[in-house]
Image (spheres, helix red, strand yellow):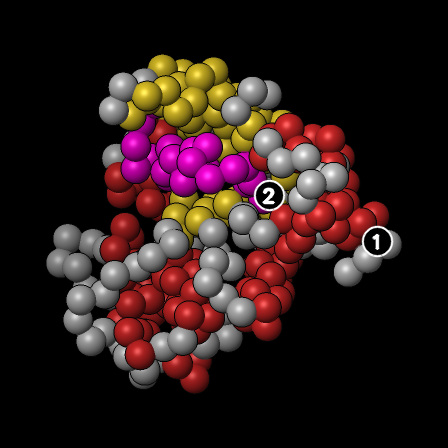
């Protein structure tokens, strides 16, 4: 079976600095994967490569067997949606107006929304449970509400793959748990998800697999119980667990001995 997302010896450099060399992995349709690694390791860059926003200097990235480099931005946007950490909205757009922008890759020559476009917008609103927000101004929403609207914007594209860049960043624990519930729900409805995650304790129970970017080990892919281990994490994050109790807590959480 052709994987939904495939990196084949992908390389990428920026400002003379190599970010990735010979990066290879696959993501199957229906997976819910967490992307982790220390700050500056290249998590956001990997998501941007997967979305076709930036291109490999060597190797390839493929979506459903089609090289992203050969797709137009519109074609790529019909296959994959990326939700960045920040979305700047300079005008007083309502939530519904924001989500309608997700239909842009599907619009015809005249640019008006069709019945099918309206249905896609309504489904995105329904899936993220934000109908009560549709008339609100986006810039007046709380952080948790904005995150749901941003995800609805991506879902309105009707993508095969949803990419989330640090979706729980700056949210309080209650809003983090709500967002994790949403991620699990979306995955259960058939949405394939790859999310860059900062909080390791939020991974177990939501994500079926983990991609760990490490400065000296390349990329490690596996189940959370196989990847979120102290010996692996202390090397990847340069953070010995005996000096940093958070990694010990992470390990106990994965084993179910602590919450």
Please state the total of marks drawn on the protein image. 2
Residue 33, disc: 2
Residue lying at the far left of the rendered structure: 110
Q: Nearer the viewer, residue 241 or 201?
A: 241
Q: Which residues are magenta?
A: 33-56
**Callout 1 secondary element:** loop
- Pointer 1: what residue? 256
Is 237 magenta? The answer is no
Residue in view at x 58 percent, y 44 percent: 34
Residue in the picture at 73% in, 31% down? 231
Residue at (44% x, 17% y) in the render: 21
Q: Is 30 on the left or on the right of 104, as rendered?
A: right
Tell me if residue 52 is in the magenta stretch.
yes
Circle 2 packing at 10 Å, graded few (<14), some (14-19), many (20+), is many
Quarter of the image containing the N terminus?
Answer: top right
117 in relation to 71, above or below: below
Residue plotted at (59% across, 31% down): 238
Residue 254 lies, in percent from the top left, at 77, 48
User: Considering only vertical position in the picture, is 18 above or below 188?
Assistant: above
Left or right of 109? Residue 80 is right
């Amino acid at each position: 079976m052709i994987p939904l997302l495939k990196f084949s010896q992908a390389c990428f450099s920026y400002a003379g600095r190599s970010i990735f060399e010979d990066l290879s992995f696959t993501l199957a349709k229906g997976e819910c994967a967490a992307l982790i690694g220390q700050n500056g390791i290249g998590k956001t860059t990997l998501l941007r490569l997967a979305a076709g926003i930036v291109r490999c200097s060597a190797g390839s990235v493929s979506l459903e067997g089609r090289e992203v480099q050969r797709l137009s931005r519109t074609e790529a946007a019909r296959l994959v949606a990326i939700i960045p950490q920040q979305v700047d909205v300079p005008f007083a757009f309502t939530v519904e107006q924001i989500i309608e922008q997700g239909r842009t890759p599907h619009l015809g020559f005249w640019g008006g929304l069709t019945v099918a476009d309206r249905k896609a917008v309504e489904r995105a609103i329904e899936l993220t449970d934000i109908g009560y927000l549709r008339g609100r101004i986006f810039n007046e929403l709380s952080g948790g509400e904005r995150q749901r609207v941003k995800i609805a914007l991506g879902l309105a594209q009707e993508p095969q793959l949803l990419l989330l860049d640090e979706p729980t960043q700056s949210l309080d624990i209650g809003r983090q748990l709500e967002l994790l519930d949403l991620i699990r729900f979306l995955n259960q409805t058939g949405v394939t998800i790859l999310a860059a995650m900062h909080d390791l304790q939020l991974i177990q129970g939501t994500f079926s697999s983990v991609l760990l970017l490490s400065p000296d080990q390349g990329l490690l892919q596996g189940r959370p119980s196989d990847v979120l281990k102290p010996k692996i994490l202390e090397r990847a994050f340069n953070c010995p667990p005996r000096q940093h109790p958070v990694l010990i807590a992470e390990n106990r959480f994965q084993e179910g001995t602590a919450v």
